[in-house]
Amino acid sequence: MEWSISDGTTIKGPFTLLDGTVVDADKRNSPVSVDTYYITPNKCTECQGFHEEPQCAAVCPVDCCVPDEMYRETVEELLAKKEKMHI
Ligand code: SF4
């Protein structure tokens, strides 16, 4: 399923991704995977500022929501992402 930065957020207009690329928030992006569910690192805040633990991991019955070693972010970085996405 395609995704965009604006889906489920208050973001409009230009948005800088984790890799520095600037995209329009409404741009439809290709699926990260078509065979599996996926989490978009550019949008995941590990639920910082909302819950004490990642809610997807907390409810997944087969423990498939695991940390992505390619994206290690500090709590401060995750909270800044949350503030940017949910004004
Ligand atoms: S950790 Fe929270 S923000 Fe990230 S994908 Fe899971 S539920 Fe969504």
Image (cartoon, rainbow, N blue to C red):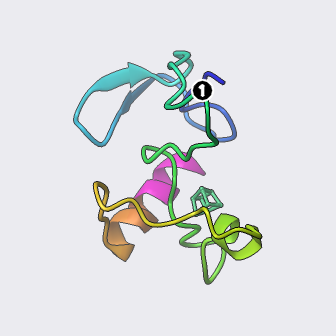
Find residue 74 and report its horizontal and vertical position in percent: 31, 72
Residue 87 in view, yes or no: no
Looking at the image, is 3 positioned above or below residue 77? above
Horizontal side of residue 66 vs 10, given as left or right: left
Q: In the rendered image, which quarter is residue 78 located in?
A: bottom left
The secondary structure that dominates the magenta segment is helix
The answer to which quarter of the image holds residue 31 is top right
Q: Is mark 1 within 8 Å of ligand 1?
A: no
Quadrant of picture, ligand 1: bottom right
Residue at point 50%, 20% (across, down)? 29
Q: Position of residue 69 (x, y in %)?
A: 31, 62
Give the percent coordinates (x, y) of residue 44: 51, 54
Residue 48 x %, y %? 53, 71
Residue 2 visible somewhere in the drawing: yes
Stretch in magenta: 81-87
Instruction: Report the residue at 61% width, 62% height from top.
Output: 64
Q: Could you tell me which residue is drawn at 28 percent across and 54 percent down?
A: 70
Identify which residue is drawn at 77% across, 70% down.
61
Q: Is residue 25 above or below residue 19?
A: above
Residue 75 lies within the magenta run: no
Q: Check the image and report above or below for 46 versus 7.
A: below
Q: Which residue is mark 1?
A: 34
Residue 16 is drawn in which quadrant? top left
Q: Residues within 10 Å of mark 1 (few under 14, many from 20)?
A: few
Quadrant, the N terminus: top right
For numbered disc 1, what is the local secondary structure? loop
* Above-or-below relation of 64 to 74: above
